[in-house]
Image (tube, rainbow, N blue to C red):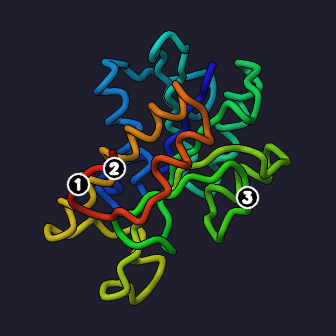
Amino acid sequence: MIAIFGLGNPGSEYEMTRHNVGFMVVDAIAKNLKIDFKHGKGEYVIGSGKYKGREILLVKPLTYMNNSGVAVKDVVEQFKIDVKDIWVICDDLNLPLGMIRIRQKGSDGGHNGLYSIIYHLKTIEFPRLRCGIGNPEKMQNMVDFVLSKFDDDEIEKVNDMIDRAVEATFCFISDGILTAMNRFNKKVMTGNKTP
């Protein structure tokens, strides 16, 4: 079983904000696979389904970004999931808007959601997919920026990035982390999808 965690903040005021890209990608996966969310046994919503014969869980923590690790740990322990079989999807301020980057493991890179997960799981050894939200022209105050909504002129790039993040997730599920990294860690930000 693979558990896919999309990071974000719950509540309508945070919808379509930069910090909620993880939620957006998981919602797109759920729509693609016709998976419905329901409240889990902890502070998260969860849905289950299959992709190419593999069982998957889709999870959106409701703990707010800075405490994402609480929900992730709950799900990992409840379903007895190996940390190498979790896939964390989050925004990344240090990547240009539209770029995605897959890592097999690593530090939090200054991301509070990843920091919380590392803290609660006591390991950095879990795969993650980071979605670029960086835009130097618009970044004045970092906190205000990540909690702001995408502008109209950014939506096309965002939608393309979400599509590729969904493809990358499906590749991870069916073919594994190394294939996903080889296919999707390219410097493609807009326009044509990766082959």
| Residue at (65% x, 71% y) in the render | 110
Of helix, strand and loop, which one carries label 1? loop
Q: Nearer the viewer, residue 86 or 138?
A: 86
Amino acid type of the residue that numbered disc 2 sits on in the rendered structure? Thr
**Residue 116 left/right relative to 18:** right
**Mark 3 or mark 2, which is nearer the start of the sequence?**
3
Q: Which residue is mark 2?
A: 194
Of helix, strand and loop, which one carries label 3? loop
- Cα–Cα span, label 1 and label 2: 6 Å
Of helix, strand and loop, which one carries label 2? loop
Q: Place residue 195 in its image quadrant.
A: top left
* Numbered circle sitting on residue 192: 1
Amino acid type of the residue that numbered disc 3 sits on in the rendered structure? Gly
Q: Which residue is mark 3?
A: 106
Relative to 155, is 61 above or below?
above
| Residue at (78% x, 52% y) in the render | 124
Pointers 1 and 2 in contact (C-beta within 8 Å): yes
Q: Nearer the viewer, residue 58 or 15?
A: 58
| Residue at (76% x, 52% y) in the render | 118
**Residue 183 left/right relative to 32:** right
Q: Place residue 134 in its image quadrant.
A: bottom left
Task: Name the outermost residue toward the top.
Answer: 53
**Residue 36 left/right relative to 40:** left
**Crowding near the residue tagged with mark 1, few <14, some 14–19, many ≥20 C-alpha atoms within 10 Å:** few
| Residue at (67% x, 28% y) in the render | 75
- Image quarter where the N terminus lies is top right
